[in-house]
Amino acid sequence: KAFKRGGDFPKIQIPDFTEEIRETGRAWAKQEMMKIGTFLERSPDFMHLMPIDDEDAGRAWASPRSFENYAIVAGQAKAFGYHEDVISLLRRGMIGEPASVGLQNFLDTMDLQDPEELIANPELTRVPPRGRSDVAMLTSESLVICLERQLTAKRWKGAWQVLEKLDGEGIYLDAIAPALADMNKLLTASIMKECRPMLEASPLLRRFSELKNREGFVRDYELADDDLDAEIGLV
């Protein structure tokens, strides 16, 4: 129709590539890389699928570099708000059909919940089935990425409540421990002041404090109110 109109093609609105979108894209890319790492750990044969004939040589194929590039591009696409169908096309076009199908099937079995939805509604958190520590790990790290994008006391508190449910009464403590350490780094004086009652009553905090062999995880947080401006740790 545009040709019939003499070349009157519709104008495409290109979104502004702001610093906020750039940072959001980096956060999403980090999440994609974690998913890819977990997938490749379980299915290492997909790490490097070099073409074996001339027909495949002209198509996308999986390699560490193509996986990394896909994660970066997918992250920026998500930051711009593109639909999952677009992400799927990017995946097939950058890592090839076999690896793309394998990765998607793996993600489907994980059935990951939306971290932003969980932060807003911690009661919706599902404890992963036994043996799926990868689900607990990816979900917990996704929470941290969301907090890094937008940190408030309410959101930090919601993320902690999600971690309490993910922990499964200690079943997945090892899997979520890195996220707990990252949460500690995000804990400001004002957030600590608001969340102190919740933390003091938290079974997860008590279990986490028992990981004495993990350097940097265990610190004294029993500070007086006058000391809240000082450096604060979870435990």
Image (spheres, rainbow, N blue to C red):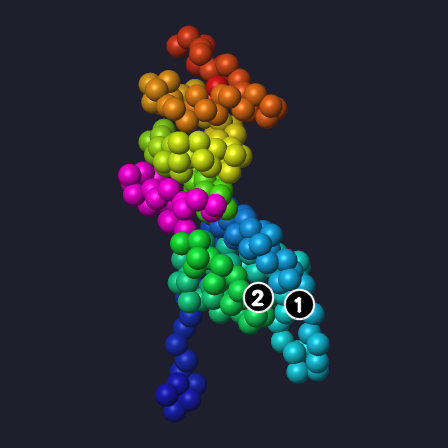
Q: Position of residue 19 (x, y in %)?
A: 50, 47
Callouts 1 and 2 close, C-beta under 8 Å: yes
The quarter of the rendered structure image containing the N terminus is bottom left
In the rendered view, does 28 fall on the left or right side of 8?
Answer: right
The disc placed on residue 99 is 2
The disc placed on residue 49 is 1
Q: Which residues are magenta?
A: 112-132
Identify which residue is drawn at 39% across, 36% down.
Answer: 168
Compared with 50, 76 (above or below) is above
Q: Is residue 136 visible?
A: yes
Q: Residue furthest front?
A: 130
Compared with 164, 98 (above or below) is below
SS state under label 1:
loop
Compared with 54, 197 (above or below) is above
Q: Position of residue 174 (x, y in %)?
A: 52, 34
Separation of marks 1 and 2 at Cα, in angstroms: 8 Å
Identify which residue is drawn at 39% across, 10% down.
Answer: 225
Compared with 65, 113 (above or below) is above
Q: What amino acid is found at the position of numbered circle 1 in the picture?
A: Leu
Q: Is residue 233 visible?
A: no
